[in-house]
Amino acid sequence: MALYSTTLLSRPAIGWTASPAPLVVLLASAALWLAAPVISAGAERKIKVAATVTMVTDLVRQVGGDRVEVMGLMGPGVDPHLYKASASDIVKLQQADVIFYCGLLLEGKMQDIFARLARTKKFVYPVTEAIPLEQLLEPPEFAGHYDPHVWFDARLWSLCVDTVVKGLSEFDPASKAHFEKRGAEYQARLAELHQWALKQADALPKEARILITSHDAFNYLGRAYGFEVVALQGISTVTETSSADMVKLVEFIRQRRVKAIFVESSVPHRTIERVARDAGVKIGGELFSDATGTPGQRERDYDLGTYEGMVKHNFNTIVEALK
Ligand SMILES: [Zn+2]
């Protein structure tokens, strides 16, 4: 599957189908790229971008438009907390002109790779670096780390647009105005999306705004849109759920007369389904937590493969189930 047009490349490249080389060799040869010139205006080829989760992939597409060819490493339904880079991922990262990832340890098992790549490649960016630290949440269960699930607040995700504009412009300074214009247009759409989400949340009475999910991804949604958020698993899906936690959650659901709880697209449904059975409560639907849907998959008037579609699906599902 050729996702970048190799015919237009001016630099030697390893094909996507190349047999995997050892990590050390790949990263060492990546150093050669540093010497390569930044592409100029009227670029004859697209900027090759590697991105991790689908939200970041979509963000780069929105800002870069037809100037970029984005390779997303993680697809729909993939859990970034557990994801380990494959040998072919390393090749893609090495071949990319620019790399964007979420950061804040979301891609927990890829940290070493990003650190090594940042030593040999110039254009490597965690998109969340644009968010002022005081706007990040640091829940106690995150054990001293920031909560990485910032995309659940459209205003914070909008700040991440700045990192993508900066990163693409640093690689291709001649196209800076183009990226700035597209970035500003997208930020205007995200501001509208934020207002839309506020309105949806307002449709629910205060006491109905309780969001119960598998893993602790929705703290930013809770803060931004006024929901009490309860999850079965901690910050990351790495931790296991204890039966004591399940019993506690069942009690909470009964006590608060919660109408519905939710499964997530990137986390196995089993445990939350058991809680629903034990508590005698319905599953309100599947929410996109750490990945969007499949690009091109339509629902109402939106594409579930985009960040905007993900937010709209989540709010429509939550409001429908809890009202
Ligand atoms: Zn998560």
Image: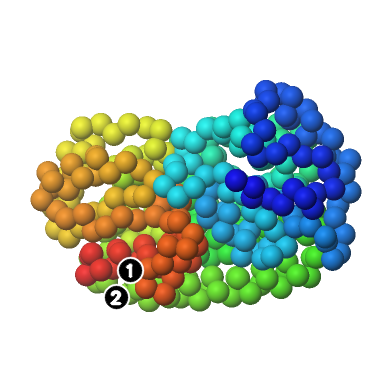
Query: Mark 1 packing: few (<14 Cα in 10 Å), some, or many (20+)?
Result: some
Q: Position of residue 195 (x, y in %)?
A: 46, 75
Residue at 56%, 34% (x, y): give it.
85
The answer to whether 275 appears left or right of 146 in the picture is left
The residue carrying mark 1 is 316
In the figure, residue 287 lies in which quadrant?
Answer: bottom left
* Residue 102 in sight: no
Closer-to-camera residue (173/144): 173
SS at circle 2: loop
**Can residue 229 be spotted in the picture?**
yes
Mark 1 or 2: in front is 1
User: Which residue is under mark 2?
Assistant: 203
Question: In the image, residue 235 lies at what x, y percent?
Answer: 41, 41
**Residue at point 24%, 44% (across, down):** 272
Kindly identify the amino acid type of the residue bearing the numbered disc 2: Ala
Q: Of the residues under marks 1 and 2, which one precedes in the sequence?
A: 2
